[in-house]
Amino acid sequence: MMASLQDRPYFFDSGLRFGCMGCGRCCSGEPGTVYVAAMEVGPIAAYLGLPAADLIADSLYPFRDSYSIREKASGDCLFFHGGCRIYPVRPRQCRTYPFWFSNLRSRYNWKQAAAECPGIGQGPLYTREEILAIARETF
Ligand code: SF4
């Protein structure tokens, strides 16, 4: 399966531009679910100087086989305070945005993502191979 995903043509064969503008739109507003893998809990807790148990109790809730991040009443991510408080150790779901398969499925989907994220179409050019490598991380 991976070989066919690798070999087929994509609308982004000549690359896509993305450079985060730090606007926080993807971390705020409408509710969402941010998957935090079990292996990501420790580094986030350490970065915040907290015991993992406190991080889990105060900021996470059970989701699938692991956790998701609680939100403020506004829908903003609990760690969003004008910027990401855990940026260097942010979960994979955040690190790989916007190169998710859901956004890469078609040029239409990418344009829809671009309507939400002003960083899409700006910044450095990611090659097809770089995009696929990031997208593969989201499996
Ligand atoms: S919406 Fe796009 S530009 Fe704004 S913070 Fe998120 S990734 Fe960055």
Image (spheres, rainbow, N blue to C red):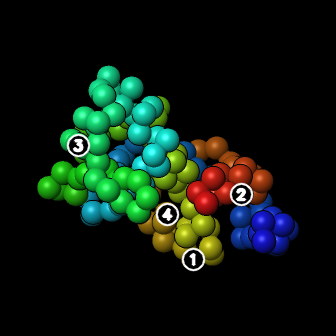
Residue 26 appearing in the image: no
Contact, mark 2 vs mark 1 (Cβ under 8 Å): no
Please report the residue visible at 48 percent of the width from the left and 66 percent of the height from the top: 113
Residue 111 against residue 83 in the figure, above or below: below
Report how far apart the C-alphas of labels 2 and 1 lie in the structure. Answer: 18 Å
Q: Quadrant of the C terminus?
A: bottom right
Q: Residue at x 32, y 56 (%)?
A: 62
Of labels 2 and 1, earlier in sequence is: 1
Q: Which residue is mark 2?
A: 132
**Image position of 94 (left or right of 16):** left
| First along the sequence among labels 3 and 4 | 3
| Marks 1/4: CA–CA distance | 10 Å
Give the crowd class for mark 1: few <14, some 14-19, many >=20 residues within 10 Å.
Answer: few
Please, what is the three-letter code of the amino acid marked with disc 2?
Leu
Label 3 to label 4, Cα distance in Å?
Answer: 35 Å
Residue 19 percent across, percent down from the top left: 54, 45
Position of 41 relative to 45 (above/below): below
Query: Looking at the rendered structure, which numbered label has been put on residue 108?
Result: 1
Spatial CA span between label 1 and label 3: 40 Å
Upstream in sequence: badge 1 or badge 4: 1
Question: Around disc 2, counting alpha carbons within 10 Å, would you say few (fewer than 14), some (14 to 19), or many (20 or more)?
Answer: some
Q: Quadrant of the N terminus?
A: bottom right
N-term-proximal mark, 4 vs 2: 4
SS state under label 3:
helix
Nearer the observer, 100 or 40: 40
State the image coordinates of residue 76 (x, y, percent, origin top left): 25, 52
